Image: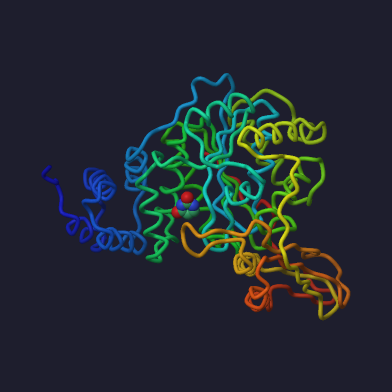
């Protein structure tokens, strides 16, 4: 096959701040997926995009080219509307776990194709894999069956879904080109649109523990993704939400499953419950689902029933004890006063260093590792009070975790709490 372009021309065009043409974009994505464009050439183009940006037309075309690199799922066999949620990732963000069964209990079908964590943010599949026996890899037929039988499925996105993104994301990760709004927006939306949901709610995290630390940049990312969804005919809305402080009281795989089960049992930390209910209501409204109110579905146990069926359908034992770490170490307050801040990024990195996350793709994670919080900003603290418990299977990991937690918490007598509101902005097309 004679290639219509040379990669070097496309790289030079973006380097010199020209817009890429539609045929150039279609070709570069297809040629990179086919292995015709080398990693070093794509790396140069990604860096040029990170530095010089892409306009709305280029982002939309780039997203479509990534969708067209693979298959598109479709759920027309289902008798309920589909709704999905995607978070840009944060510390202690376990919301998918209670949310998917909750929306199913309210009458929706939730195909939640998820990923594994890399770096300080955890991945939904790593969390679910803490449940003894639970299996993430399903064939398309199995996915449809779990969705039909339970109303929700949480599983790994198959290799056929936006394969261009899989290659590009791995390359971005090692070339410092993750933090680009056009590249993040197209990466997330190509997968979500290919996944075939009819309604999509985006949870765009902002604050120290998020990719987009700056709320203004997070808002731009949210609007970019909502527009891409609208262009593709998917009802898309976004909430920009706080990730300056970890969500809930746990960061780590089994620890977060335990907290999610507490929420499904009608308890759990108030911020996790509030965000779960808000996102559930957004999904229900966007998908036009007529059914039970989410608060009722948490209280009457119907969301928990869906969870148990969903876990069992994928080989998991919903009654099995969750893995516990072999070693624990407490961190206590060295002074008294009001806790005015807690740095989500530091907690995320500590959980990661304890073994909850991976630093290379394919690495094994520890199910029991992570950080358990005993207090959050706004609370009055006494000297010597337990603030955190660190969990790991390898005690030599404690020192590096403790090191990063230095300065994580500020305690000031009578101090003003410094934290973002849970919901920073709502974006609808
Ligand atoms: N999540 C994704 O799927 N892609 C990105 O680029 C960033 C977060």
Identity of the residue drawn at 18% across and 59% down: 8
Residue farthest along the bottom direction in this orientation:
334
Image x and y of residue 175, in percent: 37, 65
Identity of the residue drawn at 72% across and 69% down: 341
Compared with residue 25, is residue 415 higher up or lower down, i.e. above or below? Answer: below
Image x and y of residue 97, in percent: 66, 43
Q: How many marks?
A: 0
Direction from residue 66 to residue 396 in the image, left or right: right
Seen from the viewer's position, the closer of residues 185 and 67 is: 67
Image x and y of residue 93, in percent: 64, 53
Direction from residue 105 to residue 378 in the image, left or right: right
Image x and y of residue 390, in percent: 72, 68
Seen from the viewer's position, the closer of residues 129 and 326 is: 326
Screen quadrant of the N terminus: top left
Identity of the residue drawn at 41% across and 42% down: 159
Direction from residue 235 to residue 301 in the image, left or right: right
Q: Quadrant of residue 109?
A: top right
Residue farthest along the left direction in this orientation:
2
Question: How is this picture coloured?
Answer: rainbow
Seen from the viewer's position, the closer of residues 52 and 400 is: 400
Direction from residue 405 to residue 321 in the image, left or right: right
Q: Quadrant of residue 305?
A: top right
Identity of the residue drawn at 76% across and 70% down: 340
Seen from the viewer's position, the closer of residues 141 and 86 is: 141
Q: Quadrant of residue 345?
A: bottom right
């Amino acid at each position: 096959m004679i290639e219509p372009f040379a990669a070097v021309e496309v790289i030079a065009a973006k380097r010199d701040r020209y817009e890429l043409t539609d045929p150039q974009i279609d070709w570069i994505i297809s040629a990179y997926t086919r292995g015709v464009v080398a990693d070093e050439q794509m790396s140069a183009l990604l860096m040029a995009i990170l530095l010089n940006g892409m306009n709305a037309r280029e982002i939309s075309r780039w997203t479509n080219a990534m969708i067209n690199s693979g298959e598109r799922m479709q759920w027309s066999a289902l008798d309920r509307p589909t709704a999905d949620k995607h978070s840009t990732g944060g510390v202690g963000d376990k919301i998918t776990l209670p949310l998917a069964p909750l929306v199913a209990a309210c009458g929706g079908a939730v195909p939640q194709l998820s990923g594994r964590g890399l770096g300080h943010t955890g991945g939904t599949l790593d969390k679910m894999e803490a449940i003894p026996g639970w299996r993430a890899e399903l064939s398309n037929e199995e996915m449809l069956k779990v969705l039909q039988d339970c109303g929700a499925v949480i599983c790994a996105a198959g290799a056929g879904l936006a394969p261009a993104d899989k290659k590009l994301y791995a390359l971005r990760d090692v070339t410092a080109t993750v933090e680009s709004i056009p590249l993040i927006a197209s990466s997330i939306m190509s997968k979500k649109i290919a996944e075939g949901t009819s309604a999509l709610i985006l949870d765009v995290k902002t604050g120290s523990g998020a990719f987009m630390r700056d709320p203004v940049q997070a808002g731009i990312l949210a609007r970019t993704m909502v527009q891409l969804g609208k262009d593709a005919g998917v009802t898309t809305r976004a909430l920009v939400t706080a990730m300056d402080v970890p969500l809930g009281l746990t960061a780590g795989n089994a620890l977060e499953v335990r907290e999610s089960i507490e929420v499904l049992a009608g308890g759990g930390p108030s911020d996790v419950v509030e965000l779960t209910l808000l996102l559930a209501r957004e999904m229900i409204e966007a998908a036009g689902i007529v059914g039970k109110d989410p608060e009722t579905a948490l209280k009457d146990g119907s969301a928990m029933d869906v969870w148990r069926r969903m876990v069992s359908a994928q080989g998991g034992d919903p009654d099995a004890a969750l893995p516990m770490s072999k070693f624990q170490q407490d961190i206590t307050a060295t002074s008294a006063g009001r806790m005015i801040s807690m740095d989500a990024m530091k907690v995320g990195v500590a959980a990661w260093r304890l073994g909850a996350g991976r630093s290379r793709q394919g690495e094994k994670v520890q199910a029991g590792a992570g950080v358990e919080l005993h207090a959050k900003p706004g609370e009055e603290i006494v000297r010597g009070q337990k603030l955190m418990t660190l969990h790991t299977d390898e005690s030599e990991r404690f020192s590096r975790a403790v090191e990063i937690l230095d300065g994580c918490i500020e305690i000031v007598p009578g101090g003003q709490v410094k934290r973002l509101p849970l919901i920073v902005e709502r974006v609808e097309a």
